[in-house]
Amino acid sequence: MAENDAGRAARLAPWVRAMELSDQVFITGTTLTFEKIKQRRSDLPYPIDEVGLREARTPAEAVRIARSIAENYANLEPVMAPDGVDENWRISNMAKAVAETIERYHP
């Protein structure tokens, strides 16, 4: 485990911990994917606040962050990731799915 990974799970917002385990894993996995993208790419046109998605004080704040990320990356020119998938599309859709997941619990 990398040094910056220490304690990440302990910092999950209480409202995330109240979700079904599969949804906790989805949100955590998505934020880890966003971290990896940020580490690999120095050319991201918009910030990605993956910490805010999993540690926001309120679900509404996390939804706002997720919707902002989704909207920012929705209509950008494709940028191919190493696996051949448009990474801007991936970022947008993952953020949208996070927002929708949170909203199922906190409409």
Image (cartoon, rainbow, N blue to C red):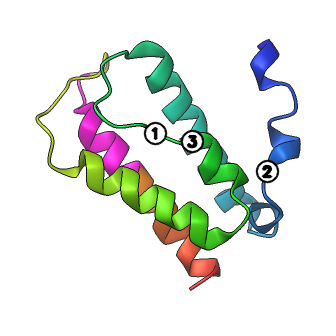
Q: Residue at x 32, y 41 (%)?
A: 90
Residue furthest bottom in the image: 107
Give the Cα distance between marks 2 and 1.
17 Å
From which residue to which does the magenta span run?
84-94
Q: Position of residue 67 (x, y in %)?
A: 40, 62
Q: Position of residue 96 (x, y in %)?
A: 39, 60
Which callout, 2 or 1, points to the residue nearer the camera? 1
Give the Cα distance between marks 1 and 3.
6 Å
Q: Nearer the viewer, residue 78 or 49?
A: 49
Q: Nearer the viewer, residue 65 or 33?
A: 65
Q: Nearer the viewer, residue 3 or 93?
A: 3
Q: Residue at x 37, y 17 (%)?
A: 41
Q: Secondary structure at mark 1?
A: loop
Q: Position of residue 68 (x, y in %)?
A: 38, 57
| Contact (Cβ within 8 Å) of mark 3 with mark 2 | no
Residue at the disc numbered 2 = 12
Q: Position of residue 43 (x, y in %)?
A: 30, 19
User: Residue type at mark 2?
Assistant: Leu
Q: Residue at x 14, y 32 (%)?
A: 78
Q: Secondary structure at mark 3?
A: helix
Kindly identify which numbered label has been placed on residue 50. 3
Kindly identify which numbered label has been placed on residue 48. 1
Q: Secondary structure at mark 2?
A: loop
Q: Quadrant of residue 59?
A: bottom right
Q: Residue 71 vs residue 16: left or right?
A: left
Q: Is residue 52 above or below residue 41?
A: below
User: Residue type at mark 1?
Assistant: Ile
Q: Is residue 64 magenta?
A: no
Q: Quadrant of residue 86?
A: top left
Q: Residue 63 vs residue 28: left or right?
A: left
